[in-house]
DNA sequence: AAGTGGTCTAGACCACAGC
DNA sequence: CTGTGGTCTAGACCACTTG
């Protein structure tokens, strides 16, 4: 069946062949693939070659490996939709797309996992503060459904002593900042991009290295425009999406 | 140095060790890592174990493999910023973040790579049309800097005959649609999420399977709100980002 | 030609889940 | 206990890039 003379590598041929069997419905959603040994025998290739093919499918998101049990066709998990009102300067949590219970932005549990002096220049640049006056706070957003996002906030180091107790009380760094500053904080800008889970984020989020993450970063400021913090949040891209409604 | 008794697997220890050597500046940005054979000898592990470690670093985005040459510490490529005016119903291309020349939304080259009957139910659902009346058009957005995005559009099949010639003329499907319909098309909604490059998208974009992609999808409609098309665009997450400015 | 990463094999042992 | 996926080794050959 598979051969290797000038054509594509065996593991890629096998990966594409399995992908077709899945797309055609021959191996339906949720079903278990043949075991690695079985595939190795059926296709007459080494088990490592089978593993390489299955690794491709796993990274592509079509398959989920459960160790000790087997490899299964992934059934897409329902994405939580967060409504972003594009015409106001606040997040509008909830909305009718999903019920409120697993609302990740309000009912979330956010805990601090690390604080450190700022080592990166980007935050200092966008905030217009010298790096030595900045501190970085890392938090993990973990609703009941499992870890959803890791965030890094860069703030003026002077705010830190008051911020961490307020964080304990509110369980939400944005709210803690409003409390410490005694004033509402607005969005200056926000940006969306995507990145791969690195060696630090991956274990925190319970995903393999390289898992696609949605990045939402930006600066928040005082009503007069003075920047307050820079945040860079990495969210599980398969579990959440941000929706902008342009019509009412 | 590395040992395997109850602790983490060798390849992960090695990956983290190399990551630390990179973060500390011992192996600076752009520099070449020792070859796989050298690492294999230095750390007294098999070359395949070294490859597994380097694979982790590649997926994490910290390292870039150039075959026949070596493995290099990745220097982040400058992200093109696309300004999205959150208060209007149009894309505001350009802006001062990057000069206009590589503007991916206006000067882009978009070409059709495939058309097919709609096989997915989601597009029919959000457009409120029966699946058999929908066609799917796949395009590749490829400015001079290399492939940047793949898009899938779902439109009423009746529009297809007029649409493809208009697409040739304008080089831009959104513009072609406006021309065919004889009316401006507005955003209904847009959503941001992230996904992994699958076995089809990966070769089109020239990235490895699983590469993080920024997904921007949504419905556009006529001024009266009648839906016209559903689009799902997958963009190289490391090459572009969407910026929403909330202040002027 | 020499060096690099890419693919593939055969074989071994381990850790985990379920019966 | 059995079967699953996870890790690791030794060795081979290939394809690509550069001198």
Image (cartoon, coloured by chain):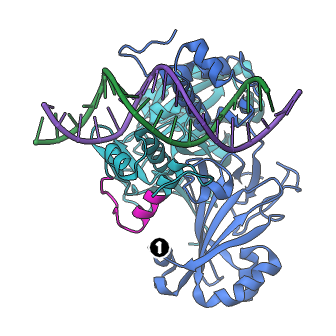
Chain colours: A cyan, B blue, C green, D purple
Residue A29 appears in view: yes
Q: Residue at x 60, y 55 (%)?
A: A7
In this picture, which residue range is highlighted in magenta?
A17-33
- Percent from the top left, x then y, of residue B69? 75, 32
Q: Residue at x 88, y 51 (%)?
A: B99
Q: Is residue B168 left or right of residue A219?
A: right
Q: Is-magenta flag for residue A209?
A: no
Viewer-proximal residue among B197 and B51: B51
Residue with the mark numbered 1:
B120
Q: Which one is in front, B52 or B179?
A: B52
- Could you say which is closer to the camera, residue A56 or residue A61? A56
- Percent position (x, y) of residue A190? 66, 48
> In the drawing, does residue D5 fall left or right of residue B117?
left
Q: Quadrant of residue B184?
A: bottom right
Residue occupying the point 52% across, 87% down: B133
Name the residue rendered at 62%, 37% in the picture. A231
Task: Please tell me in which quadrant of the rendered image residue B115 appears.
Answer: bottom right
- Is residue A245 shown above or below B35? below
**B27 left or right, relative to B49:** right
Residue C2 lies, in percent from the top left, at 77, 23
- Mark yes or no: residue A117 visible: no
Circle 1 — which element? loop
Residue B231 rendering spot, x and y as whole percentages = 60, 70
Q: Chain of mark 1?
A: B
């Amino acid at each position: 069946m598979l051969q290797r003379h000038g054509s594509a590598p065996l593991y890629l041929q096998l990966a594409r062949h399995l992908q077709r069997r899945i797309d055609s419905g021959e191996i339906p959603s949720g079903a278990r693939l043949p075991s690695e040994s079985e595939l190795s025998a059926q296709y007459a290739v080494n088990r490592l070659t089978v593993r390489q093919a299955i690794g491709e499918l796993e990274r592509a998101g079509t398959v989920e490996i459960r160790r000790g049990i087997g490899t299964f066709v992934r059934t897409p998990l329902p994405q939580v939709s967060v409504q972003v009102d594009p015409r106001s300067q606040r997040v509008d949590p909830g909305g009718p797309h999903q019920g409120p219970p697993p609302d990740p932005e309000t009912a979330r549990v956010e805990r601090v996992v690390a604080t450190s002096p700022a080592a990166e220049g980007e935050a200092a640049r966008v905030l217009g503060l010298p790096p030595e006056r900045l501190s970085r706070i890392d938090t993990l957003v973990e609703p009941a459904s499992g870890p959803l996002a890791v965030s890094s906030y860069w703030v003026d180091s002077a705010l830190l002593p008051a911020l961490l107790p307020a964080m304990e009380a509110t369980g939400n760094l944005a709210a803690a900042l409003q409390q410490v500053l005694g004033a509402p904080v607005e969005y200056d800008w926000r940006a969306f991009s995507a990145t791969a889970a690195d060696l630090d984020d991956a274990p925190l989020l319970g995903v393999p290295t390289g898992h696609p993450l949605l990045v939402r970063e930006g600066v928040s400021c005082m009503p007069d425009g003075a920047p307050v913090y820079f945040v860079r949040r990495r969210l599980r891209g398969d579990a959440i999406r941000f929706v902008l409604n342009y019509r009412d």
